[in-house]
Image (cartoon, coloured by chain):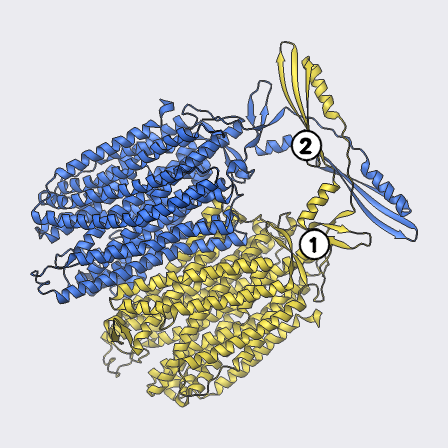
Chain colours: A yellow, B blue
Amino acid sequence: MEENIIYVPIALAVLGLLFMLVKMSWVKKQSAGSERMQSISKSIKEGALAFLSAEYRLLVIFAIIASGLLFLVSTLVESTSWMIVPAFIVGAIFSALAGNIGMRIATEANARTAEAAKTSLPQALKVSFGGGTVMGLGVAGLAVLGLSLIFLFFLGQFMGNDGSFYDNMTVVLEALAGFSLGAESIALFARVGGGIYTKAADVGADLVGKVEAGIPEDDPRNPATIADNVGDNVGDVAGMGADLFGSYVATVLAAMVLGNYVIRDIAVANGGAFTDAFNNMGPILLPLVIAGVGVLASIIGTFLVSIKNNDAKESKVQAALDRGNWAAIIITLIASYFLIEWMLPETMAMKFFGEGVKEVAAINVFWSACIGLAVGALISMVTAYYTSLGKKPVMDIVENSSTGAATNIIAGLSVGMYSTFASVILFAAAIYGSYELAGFYGVALAASAMMATTAMQLAIDAFGPIADNAGGVAEMSELEPHVRERTDILDSVGNTTAAVGKGFAIASAALTALALFAAYVTFTGIDGINIFRADVLAMLFVGGMIPVVFSAMAMKSVGKAAMEMVQEVRRQFREIPGIMEGTGTPEYAKCVDISTKAALKEMILPGLLTIITPIVIGLLFGAEPLGGYMAGVCVSGVMWAIFQNNAGGAWDNAKKSFEAGVMINGEMTYKGSDAHKAAVTGDTVGDPFKDTSGPSMNILIKLTCLVGLVIAPILGGHGADHDTDGATTEEMVFIDEDGNKTILTDKQVEQVEKADRTEISKEVMVTMNTEGDVTTAEVTIETTKNGETTIEKKTFTGTEEEVMEQIEELKDTEVKVEGGAKVIKKVKVEENKG
Amino acid sequence: MEENIIYVPIALAVLGLLFMLVKMSWVKKQSAGSERMQSISKSIKEGALAFLSAEYRLLVIFAIIASGLLFLVSTLVESTSWMIVPAFIVGAIFSALAGNIGMRIATEANARTAEAAKTSLPQALKVSFGGGTVMGLGVAGLAVLGLSLIFLFFLGQFMGNDGSFYDNMTVVLEALAGFSLGAESIALFARVGGGIYTKAADVGADLVGKVEAGIPEDDPRNPATIADNVGDNVGDVAGMGADLFGSYVATVLAAMVLGNYVIRDIAVANGGAFTDAFNNMGPILLPLVIAGVGVLASIIGTFLVSIKNNDAKESKVQAALDRGNWAAIIITLIASYFLIEWMLPETMAMKFFGEGVKEVAAINVFWSACIGLAVGALISMVTAYYTSLGKKPVMDIVENSSTGAATNIIAGLSVGMYSTFASVILFAAAIYGSYELAGFYGVALAASAMMATTAMQLAIDAFGPIADNAGGVAEMSELEPHVRERTDILDSVGNTTAAVGKGFAIASAALTALALFAAYVTFTGIDGINIFRADVLAMLFVGGMIPVVFSAMAMKSVGKAAMEMVQEVRRQFREIPGIMEGTGTPEYAKCVDISTKAALKEMILPGLLTIITPIVIGLLFGAEPLGGYMAGVCVSGVMWAIFQNNAGGAWDNAKKSFEAGVMINGEMTYKGSDAHKAAVTGDTVGDPFKDTSGPSMNILIKLTCLVGLVIAPILGGHGADHDTDGATTEEMVFIDEDGNKTILTDKQVEQVEKADRTEISKEVMVTMNTEGDVTTAEVTIETTKNGETTIEKKTFTGTEEEVMEQIEELKDTEVKVEGGAKVIKKVKVEENKG
């Protein structure tokens, strides 16, 4: 069993994908409703597929150029195999595939959810959540399968090489980083492109349709309505799928890389090879196995998501989702406990930067995972507090809407900014706590624990846009109002889960980025990243600026495309006769076209900015300034992600508050009031915040660190070749007569060295003074023996020659070496090969 | 002359203050116009004074508590004198005084400017710029005078102490830091309080008056109009005065502290005391003398600010201001060249972190100053580009206004975010360049050069609000339209200079913060700030969050107070009969009261957050994590300052664009159009950005670093007591027969040590194998002599006892020590005392 454990995640991933296929065929078997509904659904699907294929065509060009560069890197650097290139390509393809599966099922499920809503709410939930499940399992299954298979393949390729276990494994993991890089690059473009697409359509449709023409959302008379619904799919579904696929892979990869360092540290401390039953790589395989178990736990969780009562309200639906989510989390956590106990050595010698080697118990790793989950849950709660209906922050925005759009905007911005406080404190506590427990491996495992139930998280996240779309189909097909009411309940729950999911996503992304950052430092063999160096400090500032400018680009792109959309919709309202009466048909395709072109054009620059900047900085300034840059991107990126996501979420729900009516200064205020109009303005500003630039921050910070990690070998050698604090392969070991080895702590080493070696140094200091023929030399002799210094003073007088001679003689005096050698051996670590 | 140079800045400061008095009496001699004008001017003055005295009463409490804490610090730490407390108090009083002078002259000058505008534009410029000059010279004169006098006093107090020159000077400068801390603390409260006051009144007045009731700005029917004009004075004038006073003092102080390190480094390298004609403290006095010269240059510059033509437009006025400004800058720069040549040693040995000692030519310091000025000017140009009428960014916002407030806001936010790009790149280049040239002393001098002409900068900055107020007085007194037109020209120029001034201010504040940061690291004696430590990294994130939350507090306070104001104004419009017809009198005092209370209440929390957080972090986590926190505050603070200032400035001018009419999509669009209304919304959002939270960022980052510097002695000892890379007082010096000393570079030291000392170590490694009675021992003897290792292998066979004996014997073998001592001396630096 133990030595074949790599097949466990593979089997679980395959199981997840099989379950996905079953769910998929079940969803497809449901009735898609009337011909009109099917035709609308088809338009949406075609629009979305058209966009995706246009996007992929563009990304193929990017992938070819990036592959060429990667190949160049692999030829320049010994420790990088050319196989990083196919890994990169497979990662890119898998990422696109993950988005594609989600997008296809979502566009199938929308009409079917609307149709199911005709009969009952439970059935509508079943269909929409079924769609979400397909997507969740597709993403998680592909991620675990892809990582495991490629890892297995590379093991076979490289572990038989000449180098040590550590060196060979480094080559394996570096090639595997290509898979993650491919996934994350595609995710960036998909997120940004999809985000621009959806928000351009949404903002455009809302501004003219809702605000100017006063027609409801998703009204078929609105020319931008199809584009809007396509946008939900390419942005919220395909974009998010690629995003979480990338996060998931990066998190597991970072944990694996740090697992390799753990193995090396233990080996060094043991004075020999690290061995365990898992082909001597338990710490590396652990995150992969936990991820596999997370897929299984998510499948179990999905069975708990159902409601019985047709009159259920949001809270019941939310409770059903929470039930499934917590079940998956708790199962994963329990399993993790046993996996950690089983797969890790009871105690591990870990190097802590600047603190030497510490013995870390395996159970500490479990506690790190718990910290990760606890902090993830708390950050989600903070997010929920700042963005939920009826809570103080949202009510603040609502109240401020009564004095106009300006105060609404000021209030929304300040809510977003405020929300960074608790989130960042929690996040800092997570870094601090998980590091104290189990070093950067602990940080990585905290992130892995957060991400383990990605399948379930994503199922919950993805059902929202499906329900949203179902509402759109219902509206456009002019179904009875109760259908829309039911889908609205699901949509509203979906908004909350989306906001909470974003809190979780940013927390895990930031921890992942830190784990990658740690891997980077160890990889380049630099001695930490010191911001007291002017170049590092300068790059810290440059890094801090990138997320801001990236967000600016995304915002501006949305603004530009939305304006085009507004003008097109206005034109159609003006020029197409009978459009408002429902007798003229709007030209939907023109709006789809505007969004498509804008998204493709505008996603390129921010994408390249993200990828090229770290490369330029690394090559120009070296490894340490690049580290400063990475830290700057992370710090600033986390702030802007939280700020934008939460401000956007709060604005959205402030607007929604008016739908049921809300009390402002003692007066009930409803939809259509001036305050509501102000709230709509706020929501429109929040749209690109929460759906374009905000969620891109996650990818930005991870991708920055991944690019750093991949180019690290160019900037410096590998840890193994450098004798730095983090990467020594020589350690003091005490070997007793029976050949038993004991690792010495740093302090013991010091004592031993003092006792063992006899170190003598003699320093002769002379001040000479020549007057006439007489030279006087005052000589001080400092003899240091084992750190203790004795000083002797002598004065020589005579001719210069005489004095010099005496001094020379003095220097040649013999010193007796004393001291007792202990049975101490300095060992070069014998690492097992293969 | 040389030894009395300290009296030069004192004399120049006194000259500046005298010139200020002359100008002040000239302004006061001008006619204040009709009785109505005088009465309005008086109301504004009274409102402003009432606010200031309420503010000061509150700040007295703060000052007492802070003094107590400082006293506690001074008793705990040897190197901190209790005299830091009076220095703190004097700093606080001077800061308040600087704000007060400005505020008084501004409220005198407003009606007089309006009156002067009746006759001609040149005269109106003369009066308003005269008022600005009074303020500028008041601030700069007080700053230079206060710093010089206190420094002189402390020299007398402490330089006769027992310690070395460096240690005594450290005590002097640390006590002087109290002056800066006092000034900066008051500045923070004044800026935040004033900012909340002015924007609550402004937003409130605009939203109801301009937008809802459709009456012009400053209309006497608007109940908030007096509060609005008071706000201009307490926020834009008194707040800015205190702010720049604090900046100026902090910049000079930071340069003086780093000058002390320069002296120490030179002394160490010389192997003895540093001596020069300037009482051995040229590098410390230089920044003070440059500041004094800057006052003189500013006086000269003010004579160039005048126009002749009564029909002049904005560009002519701008040109006049530019002429004066550039004259002051160029005079200062030329003087700096000669001062640097005169006051600094031709070359200086400076320690560069991680790079050892480098010889730096004095001229490099001049080039650093040039870099500071060039980058400051370039950042101002970038700021001007992003915020000026007619330029692309503002036109973008204008165009986006045509599709409503939401797209206007999106465009404005993205302009602000975009503007960080060029600014941060320039700023990073300034850090990098000035550091490469002359270390952190170079960085500090770059900041000093930027700030040297503060008097002129402030005169240009302050004339804007005076002209703005003059317009208000003209409007309220119902003067002829051409008066308002003339003051509007001045006001419009004032808006541009204000935006440019903010660019300059943030650049200099950031450089000052870095210089303080450098002083902090050296002060605490830590070995740099390594972000690869989890606690440092966690605090980097916490630091990054503080400016965001600080801004949120400021924004929210403005929003809250503005809402109250809106409701009060609406109430008055509703309840006071005849108010709109001009027959009823609005209750101005109620609005003044709302702003006053809000400002006082809301300034406390952000102020305390800024001051207390670094203390808590320092005490809980220690010096290095506090350094991480400081870096986080700086990086994030710079981004948010640029973002908020520029977004606010751009929105303001986008709104202004409509006043003259602007072409959108081929149509001329004017005031009153929907697009203009959208632009007003944007401007309202931008108001707290550019006048409350944005400018507070400067103070936030400087104050954070100052607090760190003051508590540094609690966290660690002083540099002198620590043997760290940045702060060693022992150095290798070569002394030849004539007693000449030569500093050795790090490389030479290494060579010398290798040649000089004979180091022998012997390591005996044994593997024993006992079979039956026979023990075989394989022994390896490694002998290392001066780094070269020879290995000898022996095998002993026999009983265990025999073998052990042989091994013991082996260990006692004598080793001959060889080697030749050079005439090298390790000197403890003899520092001159007093």
Q: Chain of mark 1?
A: A
Image position of A378 with respect to B534: above or below: below
Q: Callout 2 environment at 10 Å: few (<14), some (14 to 19), or many (20+)?
A: some
Mark with earlier residue (2, 1): 1
Q: Give the x, y percent position of residue B833.
A: 47, 26
**Kind of element beneath mark 2:** strand
Task: Determine the residue positioned at 42% across, 59% down.
Answer: A639
Instruction: Tell me whether circle 2 and circle 1 mark residues in contact (CB < 8 Å).
Output: no
Q: Label 1: which residue? A: A269
Q: Give the x, y percent position of residue B534.
A: 54, 54
Q: Find residue B359 and name its label.
A: none
Q: CA distance from mark 2 to mark 1?
A: 34 Å
Whether discs 2 and 1 lie on one chain: the answer is yes
Q: Callout 1 environment at 10 Å: few (<14), some (14 to 19), or many (20+)?
A: many
| Amino acid found under the numbered disc labelled 1 | Ala
Q: Find residue A789 and name its label.
A: 2
The residue most toward the right is B773
